Image (cartoon, grey):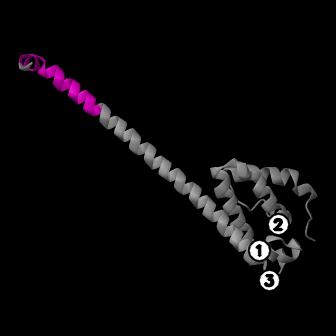
């Protein structure tokens, strides 16, 4: 056996080096996969937290969540608060929709009471990704029939 090892030492060394390199590559791929999985989990949790925070805010200020007169809110003393409320909703929507487009129906319902605001300010609302697609559809489909402020 020792004689065989001495005769084939170079080949055994090369095989060991190749095996070590292969294990290192597999370990590196595993680390990259684990980091991406952790990042995805963090992004999902962050999106859920953003929506949960918005729901808590909506319960706290129901007059902003379900405005009786969006035009009055947009022009009155509460205009900055209403702007912030809708921006918060759009942020939560952006976070959730980027994680799962399945949330679109829910956010259509959440955004519906704010159509007057969204349609009046659609040019200033900066979005991307799935929320951009949703806002584009809302503007095209819902804004022509939405109430307009005088």
Q: Which residue is mark 2?
A: 117
Q: Mark 2 near mark 1, Cβ–Cβ under 8 Å?
A: yes
Q: In x, y percent, where is residue 27? A: 35, 40
- In percent of width and height, residue 109 lies at 81, 59
At horizontal 70% and vertical 58% (from top left) the residue drawn is 93
Residue 145 x/y as whole percent: 93, 57
Span shown in magenta = 3-21
Foreground pick, 55 / 94: 55
> Tag 3, which secondary structure?
loop
| 78 to 28, vertically: above or below | below
Q: Is residue 138 magenta?
A: no
**Looking at the image, which residue is at 63% across and 64% down?**
50
Q: From the viewer's perspective, is 59 left or right of 116?
A: left
Cα distance in 3D space between marks 1 and 3: 10 Å
Q: Main secondary structure of the magenta part?
A: helix
- CA gap, disc 2 and disc 3: 15 Å
Residue 7 within the segment the image draws in magenta: yes
Image quarter where the C terminus lies is bottom right
Secondary structure at badge 1 equals: helix
Q: Is residue 29 visible?
A: yes
Closer-to-camera residue (52/143):
52
Report the residue marked by disc 3. Answer: 77
* Picture mark count: 3
Q: Which mark is residue 82?
A: 1
Q: Which is nearer the N-term, disc 1 or disc 3? A: 3
Numbered mark located on residue 56 in the image: none
Label 3 crowding class (10 Å Cα cut-off): few <14, some 14-19, many 20+?
few
Q: Quadrant of residue 19?
A: top left
């Amino acid at each position: 056996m020792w004689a065989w090892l001495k005769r084939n030492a170079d080949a055994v060394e090369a095989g060991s080096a190749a095996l070590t390199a292969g294990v290192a590559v597999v370990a590196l791929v595993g680390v990259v996969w684990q980091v991406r999985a952790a990042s995805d989990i963090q992004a999902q949790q962050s999106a859920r937290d953003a929506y949960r925070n918005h729901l808590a805010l909506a319960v706290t200020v129901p007059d902003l969540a379900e405005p009786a007169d969006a035009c009055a809110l947009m022009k009155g003393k509460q205009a900055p608060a209403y702007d912030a409320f809708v921006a918060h909703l759009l942020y939560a929507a952006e976070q959730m929709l980027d994680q799962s487009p399945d949330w679109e129906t829910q956010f259509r319902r959440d955004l519906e009471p704010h159509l007057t605001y969204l349609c009046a300010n659609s040019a200033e609302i900066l979005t991307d990704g799935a929320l951009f697609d949703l806002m584009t559809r809302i503007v095209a489909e819902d804004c022509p029939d939405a109430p307009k402020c005088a």
